[in-house]
C-alpha cells in the first residue's frame, strides 16, 4: 500500500472571462491529499467547490480556464495513450500533460462522479453499453467477454444484479442510477475518485445507503477520495479531513473531528451553526447574513469581511493567508494570526 501525498495543489487559479469582467472561481488554492484519505470540500453554492474538482481533471467548462498553479499527481503504473507513448509511472504536474495524455488518465487514474446521474447517463444506451464505452475508450482491443465480466463484477459489488445490464437509465431509481455512475467511475480501478454532490437528489435513507456503499468501496478498491458537498452532515460521517471554501479560497483546512469540535474561521462556525441539531431542539437556527461576493468585482481584504461580525480594519485591507494554528488546522483569519 502506497503512502505519502497522492495529490498536491499549489497556488491554483481558475478564471472565467465574462461580459461583466473576469471572475476568479478558484483563487490561489493550495492543499495536499494523502493516499487513502477522504477529503471533504464544503461551502455555499457558488463558492468554487465543483470548479476545484473539475480543475483537477482539467474539465473546467468554458469560458473558464486554469491560469496559474500546479496540480501534482502520483501515478503508480504506466497509463496507455492510444497510438502514442504511455505516460510512465511517477509524479506529474497534470497541467503539463497534453490532451491525449490527460484523456488517458481520466477514468484510469482519476475518476469523476458528476452531480446528476440522469443527465450524465445516455438515455439511448443500456447499462452494458455505458460500461463497454468506458472500457473500450481506454483499451480498444478489449474483448467483449472481458467487458461483460468487468461490468458484472462492478455491478455486483454495488448491489445491482448483473441481469439488469440490458436495462436503460430511466428503468432505475435515483439511488440505483447513482450506483451505476459510481460503478462507471470504478470500473477502470482509478486511484482517485472525485464525487461531486453524489447524494444531493436522494432521500435520506438512500443517501445513507450510498454513503455506506462508498465507504466500503473505498476500502475494497483502495481509493483516495474527494467528496464535494454543501451537506456538512455527510462529511461528518465520511471525510477524514475537510476544506472549507469561500469565494474560491480555502479559508480553513483540517481534520474532520477538529473542524467540527473546534472550528476557527467565522465562516466555518456560521456554517456549522446553520445546521439543525436534534440534540438541541431549543436552539434557534442561525443564518449567515448577506450574500457571497460578486467575483467579477472582488472586494479588498478578506472576502468574508462584509458578512463577518468579527471583522477588523485589517480584514478590509489585506487578504489573510492560510496558516497553521495550534489546534492542528490551517485557517485564513486574522483572529488567529499575530501579524496584525
Image (cartoon, helix red, strand yellow):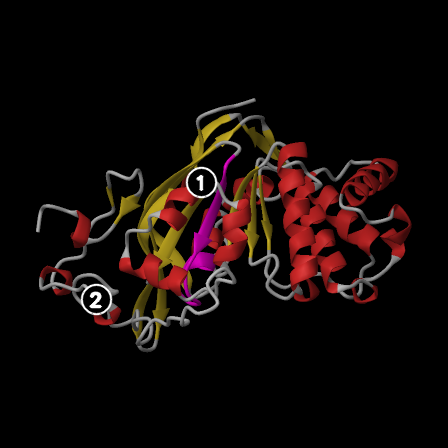
Q: Is residue 218 above or below residue 88?
A: below
Q: Is residue 270 rendered magenta in the image? A: no
The image position of residue 271, as x and y in percent, is: 38, 62
Q: Quadrant of the N terminus?
A: top right
Query: On residue 273, which mark appears?
Result: none
| Residue 9 placement, left or right of 330 | right
Mark 2 near mark 1, Cβ–Cβ under 8 Å? no
Q: Is residue 168 above or below residue 87?
A: below
Q: Is residue 171 above or below residue 217?
A: below
Dot 2 or dot 1, earlier in sequence: 1
Q: CA distance from mark 2 to mark 1?
A: 34 Å
Q: What residue sits right under mark 2 in the picture?
A: 305
Residue in the image at 34% along x and 57% along y: 268
Q: Residues within 10 Å of mark 1 (few under 14, many from 20)?
A: some
Residue in the image at 48% along x and 67% along y: 281
| Residue 270 placement, left or right of 60 | left
Q: Does the image show residue 79?
A: yes
The image position of residue 280, as x and y in percent, is: 46, 63
Residue mark closest to the camera, 2 vs 1:
2
Q: Which residues are magenta?
A: 37-51
Q: Is residue 48 rendered magenta in the image? A: yes
Q: What residue sits right under mark 1 in the picture?
A: 94
Q: Does the image show residue 68?
A: no
Q: Nearer the viewer, residue 77 or 327?
A: 327
Q: Nearer the viewer, residue 43 or 144?
A: 43
Residue in the image at 77% along x and 41% along y: 157
Secondary structure beneath dot 2 equals helix
Residue farthest front in this picture = 282
The image position of residue 33, as x and y in percent, is: 43, 37
Q: Nearer the viewer, residue 286 or 199?
A: 286
Residue farthest right in this picture = 163
The image position of residue 201, as x and y in percent, is: 63, 66
Amino acid at each position: 500500500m502506497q503512502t505519502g501525498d497522492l495529490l498536491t495543489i499549489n497556488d491554483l487559479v481558475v478564471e472565467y472571462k465574462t461580459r461583466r469582467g473576469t471572475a476568479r472561481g478558484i483563487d490561489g488554492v493550495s492543499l495536499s491529499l494523502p493516499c487513502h484519505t477522504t477529503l471533504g470540500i464544503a461551502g455555499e453554492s457558488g463558492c468554487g467547490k465543483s470548479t476545484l474538482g473539475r480543475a483537477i481533471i482539467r474539465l473546467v467548462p468554458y469560458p473558464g480556464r486554469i491560469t496559474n498553479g500546479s496540480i501534482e499527481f502520483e501515478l503508480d503504473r504506466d497509463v496507455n495513450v492510444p497510438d502514442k507513448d504511455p505516460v510512465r509511472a511517477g509524479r506529474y504536474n497534470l497541467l503539463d500533460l497534453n490532451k491525449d495524455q490527460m484523456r488517458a488518465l481520466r477514468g484510469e487514474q482519476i475518476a469523476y462522479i458528476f452531480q446528476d446521474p440522469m443527465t450524465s447517463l445516455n438515455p439511448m444506451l443500456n447499462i452494458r453499453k455505458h460500461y463497454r464505452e468506458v472500457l473500450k475508450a481506454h483499451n480498444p482491443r478489449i474483448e467483449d467477454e472481458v467487458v461483460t465480466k468487468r461490468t458484472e463484477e462492478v455491478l455486483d459489488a454495488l448491489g445491482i444484479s448483473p441481469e439488469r445490464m440490458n436495462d436503460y437509465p430511466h428503468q432505475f431509481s435515483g439511488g440505483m442510477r447513482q450506483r451505476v455512475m459510481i460503478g462507471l467511475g470504478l470500473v477502470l480501478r482509478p486511484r482517485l475518485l472525485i464525487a461531486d454532490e453524489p447524494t444531493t437528489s436522494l432521500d435520506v435513507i438512500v443517501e445513507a445507503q450510498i454513503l455506506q456503499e462508498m465507504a466500503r468501496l473505498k476500502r475494497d478498491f483502495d481509493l483516495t477520495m474527494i467528496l464535494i458537498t454543501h451537506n456538512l452532515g455527510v462529511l461528518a460521517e465520511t471525510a477524514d479531513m475537510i476544506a472549507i471554501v469561500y469565494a474560491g479560497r480555502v479559508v480553513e483546512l483540517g481534520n474532520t473531528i477538529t473542524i467540527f469540535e473546534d472550528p476557527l474561521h467565522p465562516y466555518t462556525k456560521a456554517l456549522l451553526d446553520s445546521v439543525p441539531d436534534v440534540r438541541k431542539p431549543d436552539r434557534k437556527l442561525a443564518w449567515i447574513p448577506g450574500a457571497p461576493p460578486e467575483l467579477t468585482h472582488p472586494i479588498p481584504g478578506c472576502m468574508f469581511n462584509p458578512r463577518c461580525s468579527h471583522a477588523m480594519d485589517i480584514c478590509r485591507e489585506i487578504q489573510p493567508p492560510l496558516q497553521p494554528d495550534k489546534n492542528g488546522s490551517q485557517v485564513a483569519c486574522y483572529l488567529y494570526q499575530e501579524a496584525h
